[in-house]
Image: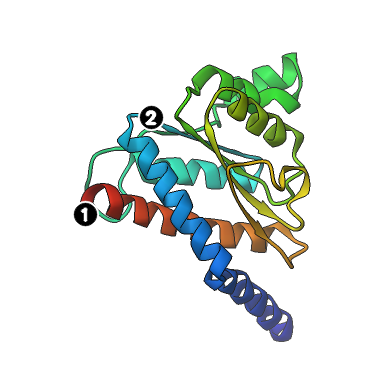
Amino acid sequence: MQTKILQSVDDGVRAIEFLKKPESLVFIQNAARMISECFKNGNKLLVAGNGGSLCDAMHFAEELTGIFRYKRKALPAIALSDPGHLSCMANDIGYHDVFSRGVEALGRAGDVFVALTTSGNSQNIVLAVEMAKAMGLKTISFLGKTGGKLKGVSDLEWVIQGFSYSDRIQEAHMTAIHIIIEMIEHELFYA
């Protein structure tokens, strides 16, 4: 069992090491700048994902509306996670539109929409990105594997390659999200 555990630890370290790649550093920097500019202009952040990525979306939003490292002004961020909306849409229309309808209802030109998907193929996330772009929102995609259908679609994207399981991709995504939040706080409040 220890051999298997060590193999998993090595995979986790390899996923986090992905953040040191030059393209990862550029993505983190550009995402932090894009979101900071959004907030400076009086706009908001919308975030969506499925399953564990939805939990990551909620975590992303709450770190901005709440407090991350220091006490500061609350920042406008919404995870598209309302259970009433999700179950209404899934029951009445279909799960494929749960996030695009959320973007349509809450998004405004100048806002930023963040898509979290480890495959890049989740139809409801693809449709949400398409809706966001059509409405004039800026888009950021955190992807995995090959990038899937969303590869090349968003204004900014980051693809965690080399992992067949979502958990390792999500670990890299969440580490990047934490660093982005740290950089947003620095840019807006401490620079």
Q: In this view, does 4 lie above or below 174?
A: below
Amino acid at circle 1: Tyr
Tag shown at residue 119: none
**Sequence-earlier tag: 2 or 1:** 2
Q: In this view, does 66 lie above or below 118?
A: above
Q: Residue at x 65, y 80 (%)?
A: 10
Position of 33 compared to 151: left or right?
left
- Colour scheme of this structure image? rainbow
Tag shown at residue 43: 2
Whether residue 146 appears in this view of the structure is yes
Asked which secondary structure carries label 2, the reply is loop
Residue position marked by numbered label 1 in the rendering: 190
- Which image quarter holds the N terminus? bottom right
Between residues 103 and 50, which one lies in front from this camera angle? 103
| Residue 159: quadrant of the picture | bottom right
Between residues 76 and 133, which one lies in front from this camera angle? 133
Position of 62 compared to 69: left or right?
right
Amino acid at circle 2: Asn
Picture coordinates of residue 167 (x, y %)? 67, 59
Picture coordinates of residue 136 (x, y %)? 54, 26
Q: Residues within 10 Å of mark 2 (few under 14, many from 20)?
A: many
Picture coordinates of residue 133 (x, y %)? 60, 29
